[in-house]
Image (cartoon, rainbow, N blue to C red):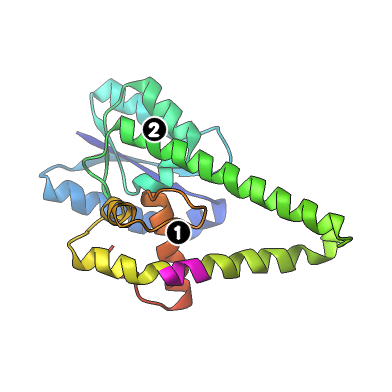
Amino acid sequence: MLIGYLRVSTGKQQISGLGLEAQRTSIENYAAQIGETVDQFFVEAESGKKKNRPELQAALFACKRNKATLIIAKLDRLARNVAFVSSLMESGVEFIAVDAPYANKLMLHILSAFAEHEREVISERTKAALATAKERGVVLGSHGKVLARTNREAALQHASKVSPYVEAAKASGAKTLADIAQYLSENGVQTASGGQWHPMTVRRVLVRLKGKGLSGTSGT
């Protein structure tokens, strides 16, 4: 028995169905492949920063009551959510992530730790850049947009450099974000922060490449 959990970031997305339909379709298609059906869906419309997840708690309770397995569409999306990771660990409920069906709770915990570390690194770099600008006499309020644009441009430049390696990973048989992350790490390609790759950082690069109209976005 499967119980689905869908999440979108805002109430507006929930009303429009943006993101929900894709998640639902992904989950239902996978369930059909393994000969299962999804008995119930729980839909959460919350900011990624909020820790309160009533629908997640309801989904976990339903899984425990019915001895069901929780199924989600995107492991990398929810692995960044500390509330999701903590709730899942404490509940004892088994789960399936469609984009990484062989992932386990340990992998989820590791991904969450990587994501938290990446957020801290970005935060520290931003604070350092702002402090340096302030020391030079820059009025931060009027230059914030310039700094943000500079950071975006740097991220796009890095994504462009990584694009050929992403294509090479796919050509070598990489099918999932985790496969690509492993290929990039094994071939000494660094992330923008100089760390190791994991599915979430690969996804961010793919989104940037797609937005810039470059290759490296298909087949994942």
Magenta highlight: main SS: helix
At label 2, which amino acid type do we have? Answer: His
Which quadrant of the figure contains the N terminus? top left
Q: Earlier in the sequence, mark 1 or mark 2?
A: 2
Left or right? Give the position of 107 relative to 155: left
* Image point (12%, 50%), residue name: 33
Residue 185 x %, y %: 33, 52
| For residue 161, above or below residue 188 | below
Residue 134, picture quadrant: bottom right
* Image point (32%, 21%), residue name: 92
Residue range in magenta is 157-161
Q: CA distance from mark 1 to mark 2?
A: 19 Å
* Image point (32%, 36%), residue name: 107
Q: Are marks 1 and 2 in contact (CB under 8 Å)?
A: no
The residue that disc 2 covers is 109
Q: Does the stretch in magenta take in 142?
A: no
Q: Nearer the viewer, residue 13 or 146?
A: 146
Visible in this render: residue 19?
A: no
Instruction: Tell me the SS state at disc 2.
Output: helix
Visible in this render: residue 5?
A: yes
Residue 93 x %, y %: 30, 26
Left or right? Give the position of 188 relative to 112: left
Residue 188 x %, y %: 35, 56
Numbered mark located on residue 204 in the image? 1
At label 1, which amino acid type do we have? Answer: Arg
Q: Nearer the viewer, residue 161 or 28?
A: 161
| For residue 85, above or below residue 43 | above
Residue 40, picture quadrant: top left
State the residue lying farthest toward the left.
35
| For residue 218, above or below residue 55 | below
Residue 143 x %, y %: 80, 65
For disc 2, the neighbor class at 10 Å (few under 14, some 14 to 19, many from 20) is some
